[in-house]
Image: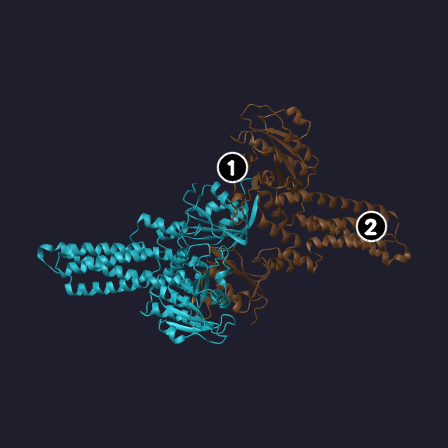
Chain colours: A brown, B cyan
Amino acid sequence: MSFDHNIVAIATPPGRGAIGIVRISGNNSYLLAERLVGQKEKWRQSDTRSLQLFSVIDADGKPVDDVLMVKFKSPHSFSGEDIVEIHCHGSFYILHKIVDLLLDHGARLAEPGEFTKRAFLNGKIDLVQAESLDDLIASKSQSAAQLSLENLHGHLSEKLLQIRTYLKEQCALLELELDFAEEDVEFVSRNEFIHKTTNILVDIRDLLSSFQMGRILQEGVYAALIGRPNVGKSSLLNCLLKADRAIVAEEPGTTRDTLQEQIDIRGILFNLIDTAGLRPTHSQIEALGISRTQKAIDRSDILIFIFDAHETLQPEDKRLLQESGSWPVPRIFVLNKKDLQQNIESDELKTFSPNAMVSLSAKNGKGIEKLEEILYQLIYQKHSAAGQTFFITRKRHQQELLQAQKELENALASLKQNFSSEFVAADLYRALDHIGSITGHVAREEILNDIFTSFCIGK
Amino acid sequence: MSFDHNIVAIATPPGRGAIGIVRISGNNSYLLAERLVGQKEKWRQSDTRSLQLFSVIDADGKPVDDVLMVKFKSPHSFSGEDIVEIHCHGSFYILHKIVDLLLDHGARLAEPGEFTKRAFLNGKIDLVQAESLDDLIASKSQSAAQLSLENLHGHLSEKLLQIRTYLKEQCALLELELDFAEEDVEFVSRNEFIHKTTNILVDIRDLLSSFQMGRILQEGVYAALIGRPNVGKSSLLNCLLKADRAIVAEEPGTTRDTLQEQIDIRGILFNLIDTAGLRPTHSQIEALGISRTQKAIDRSDILIFIFDAHETLQPEDKRLLQESGSWPVPRIFVLNKKDLQQNIESDELKTFSPNAMVSLSAKNGKGIEKLEEILYQLIYQKHSAAGQTFFITRKRHQQELLQAQKELENALASLKQNFSSEFVAADLYRALDHIGSITGHVAREEILNDIFTSFCIGK
């Protein structure tokens, strides 16, 4: 009996916990798992999906752990193959010991993402769904999780399938024409063709324009906090963090970066970059500091300017406004220290045309909800204005869609210039290829490797 | 419907993984879990121990994740109560979101070890078994895991129960005597009593003497590597590490300590302390360095002296031998650089009476198995000489047993001095109390708290 088709991995995060899971997938998973347990007959008889108690024993018959084990029968399993899960005590030693025993029995250690890759290869999910699984596990906010879940459920895949079906029909008709080329038959009305292809182009452009929001939903909004020293940037950051439910901040393994904090505003993740920390110390050259601030600004989706409303506008305030005024993203002006007497010239500030202005006190928290509301609305309105319902979230999708768009534009141009239909068909086939690459209906080995190696082991 | 009896926790280690588990225990766990799922009827109908697919939804009915859920019916569950496990995608956000939803529905966050504490309070396991569960999860070697598993299976508990039964019988008989005190009846033959109590004392002494080996099996052996500079301490350490299967070294979260390495020799964990790193630099005072070396030696169960066999014995070698010669633990002499010409005076070395001497080359690995064999045998023979089959592993057990031993010795003394049986009974009751404390048959609130707060959350 050979178990080289069977892959094995620890499916739970590394570290110590109450429960750890080792997962096996492959043709002979049940037989492989049988080698591991003392109660072989009980294992053979056990129902699928039913967690039963077993004793895992080593090659000498010595007990390794008491575990719960469960079978998932092909094709009704995650990978589409027979899967066994072994739920042991969450000890690093025991988890690795069980994996070692399985390797000794002939199984192979799974590569990162290999369970999901098999699910893809066995037709359980397409590539977009596979990627959304990875995104789901990485999700840090409600919006990220929900978007991933929608794409996992096939929301985006269906849309892409629709586009492919359209394109395929057109290709088939063009091919027919080519077969009857001698007879000069026109199976596709040129006008109808142009109309349909234009519609598809609109769909593709919608998807392309969803990328920015998709990225924001997944990775979060980048917002730079800009202001001269002592206007209250750190206080504002702390005030926002306190209002936050702090799920994000607690994540283990994330090194707390004093320059960047993550907060969750109504389910959207905001990465707040405190440019104060980017300022040079006295011994450093000013130029260096500015370039680091500039970098923070360059990657931002939104700029938050903070002013000390108790003081009048200072030359430094104006310099900062002018320096970062050219960056084409929404700008919010925060007039801090609302608790003190207000001396700032807000009319003058308005000449710098902010997208919103809010007065608050980072000290006592008054007005902070207003800022959160503005942040949320600015992002939401800006990117949901087109009423997008599908979102692409990966550079890979964007690149393939851009290529498909180019090919379709070529096809339209060829048609309008009355080129032979074989040229048009060639364009369409290439477009079809790019759309198919997104879902994996056209699978290229290097794309598969790229996608799955970014997964965690055991997924 | 109140869910305040229900406790909730994440049962898998923190971090990102393919699978994460949220666990609920309590009277109404099934009903609580029902609030979480879209398919309520399917949940109600689902069999116990059967993993079924559900959609977790938030208060607004929005999907949070696709999960597998399973019921464990009281009393056939870990805690003895109705338990629900929710197997979701191993995203930090999703895991915490599900916990938050359950808290919103009225459940309470579990304290560390609270699931196990409930298992104890519901009579599923005793305290020794509860502790061995904690040890099992913390185990880093085969010997540690196996010992914990044996104690989890009740091996040690049975022995303690035997002792308690004996003591209880004696107490009952002594009480009878007291009831009939007027009539001067002797229900317990004094000789038989002395004989039995002496036997129990032997058992207790055996258990007490198992503590050192029990601790070694659990925590590993501490071995100091001693030798002057350039004799090859680091090479030896690396050579041993290479031969090791390196399970231990890989454990995430453990900061690699250059002064201390952990290796697994035939299932026993060895903590090797390189005293080289403890030497003072030129700018430090010599005294400080010596005291740190001394500390490493003081905590060692074994000393490994390393010599450069290519050279003759140096004054520094002899100084080290003399300085650490008084520590009463086995000493192994390693003659390194076997690959070169041997110039060391091994006869002179023997005058320092090592427990073993081995010639090897840390450079090419020759002779390293011999050293491993010696290390293993030294530890194993020293501590298993008495043929111990039960091991106590916790200071707490040792302390209670020492108290019990004292009380029993008092009882014997009272008997021999023909004291009234009420004095003897009082001694026995106190001994019984101490033995009962170990298994938790006599439960003191502060002991419970001490034990369970050391657990990880979710266990």
Residue type at tag 2:
Ala
In the rendered image, residue A287, in percent from the top left (x then y), is placed at 66, 40
Which numbered circle lies on residue A411?
2
The furthest residue to the left:
B183
To which quarter of the image does residue B271 belong? bottom left
Q: Is residue B274 visible?
A: no
Disc 1 residue type?
Lys
Relative to A433, B86 lies left or right: left
Label 1: how many Cα within 10 Å (few below 14, some 14–19, many 20+):
few
Nearest the camera: A62 or B454? Answer: B454
Q: State left or right for residue B112 relative to residue A299.
A: left
Front position in the image: A373 or A163: A373
Secondary structure beneath dot 2 equals helix
Quick check: can you spot residue B325? yes
Mark number displayed over residue A228 = none
Percent position of residue A412, x then y: 83, 48
Q: Secondary structure at mark 1?
A: helix
Spot occupied by residue B226 in the image (x, y as percentages of width and height): 42, 65
Residue B139, relative to residue A159: is it above or below?
Answer: below
Query: Which image quarter: residue A260?
Result: top right
- Sequence-earlier tag: 2 or 1: 1
What residue is shown with label 1? A242
The lab-note entry on whether marks 2 and 1 share a chain reads yes
Residue A388 vs residue B453: left or right?
A: right
Q: CA distance from mark 2 to mark 1?
A: 55 Å
Alpha-carbon neighbours of circle 2 within 10 Å: few (<14), some, or many (≥20)? many
- Is residue A144 positioned above or below B125 on the image? above
To which chain does the residue with label 2 belong? Answer: A
